[in-house]
Amino acid sequence: IYISSSGNGSAVVDWPVTVANSNLSLTTGGISAVNVAAQDRVAVNATGQQSKNIKITAAVGISVYACWIESSASDCTNFYPTSTWGTRYRTLYTPASVGTQTVNIVTAGSAATVTLKPIYSVTGTPNLTANTATNISISANSSYQIATSTGDYSGMEISSNVPISVVNGAECVNFGSLFNAGGACDLASQSVPPISSWGTNFYSVNYRNYGTTGSGYRILADQNNTQITISG
């Protein structure tokens, strides 16, 4: 976990299993790093409710991102502060080439009743039926992970009675084969912004790649009959 700071101050990392907290001294513009021990991680193939939330609090404004470091297959994502969490989400990620695809729903200080409504039927844990609501209950300061090795959660609506956070992704995506650029298996897991933060105008910069097709994009709409214009 990497923490960048807007000012001098301190931060505390409260681990779910490890007894001793990590106390960090922060400097303006500096980056502090802590390693997550195995017992504090949610396994990629775990399903159902997990008590593995890592709580980070600071005396100054911070930005938090986390990385899975693996030779030729690393992946990172930002985590959003609880003040920006929402009650409606739609999942979006690149489906796995092989392996498991997951959605992890995170609660803070309140228990949540969460409704999952996929646009595709998904065989997994649990099994989900297209355009049909499935309700789950999640305790406070916990997470709930669903997983599939054959389906696609993309576009699934997730709604909650209290603010939550959502992280989704795939265990193994061969991005190179998708865009004719070679490469191998990569973990691809990202925090999802709530629908309340979505917009109507975006700018993007092409990623560097070694193929001939340029970068690939997935565009997700919340409402039917949304018109998309791409220029530039």
Image (tube, helix red, strand yellow):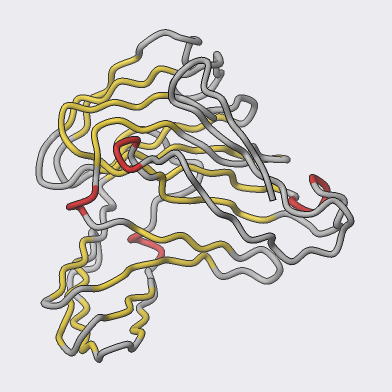
Q: Eyeballing the image, is 135 above or below 114?
A: above
Give the residue drawn at x 29%, y 26%. Answer: 159
Image position of 34 (left or right of 17): right
Image position of 196 (left or right of 221): left
Give the residue drawn at x 37%, y 45%. Answer: 193
Q: How many marks?
A: 0
Q: Eyeballing the image, is 135 above or below 84?
A: above
Q: Eyeballing the image, is 134 above or below 195?
A: above
Give the residue drawn at x 16%, y 27%. Answer: 161
Q: Pinpoint residue 80: horizontal percent, then vertical percent.
A: 30, 56
Q: Pinpoint residue 203: horizontal percent, then vertical percent.
A: 55, 54
> Quadrant where the N terminus lies?
bottom left
Q: Pinpoint residue 148: horizontal percent, then vertical percent.
A: 55, 29
Q: Nearer the viewer, residue 144 or 39?
A: 144
Q: Tell me the quarter of the picture where residue 184 sits.
A: bottom right
Q: Pinpoint residue 86: horizontal percent, then vertical percent.
A: 24, 39
Give the residue drawn at x 60%, y 47%. Answer: 171
Q: Eyeballing the image, is 105 above or below 191?
A: above
Image position of 220 (left or right of 192): right
Image position of 163 (left or right of 31): left
Q: Tell me the quarter of the picture where residue 104 sits.
A: top left
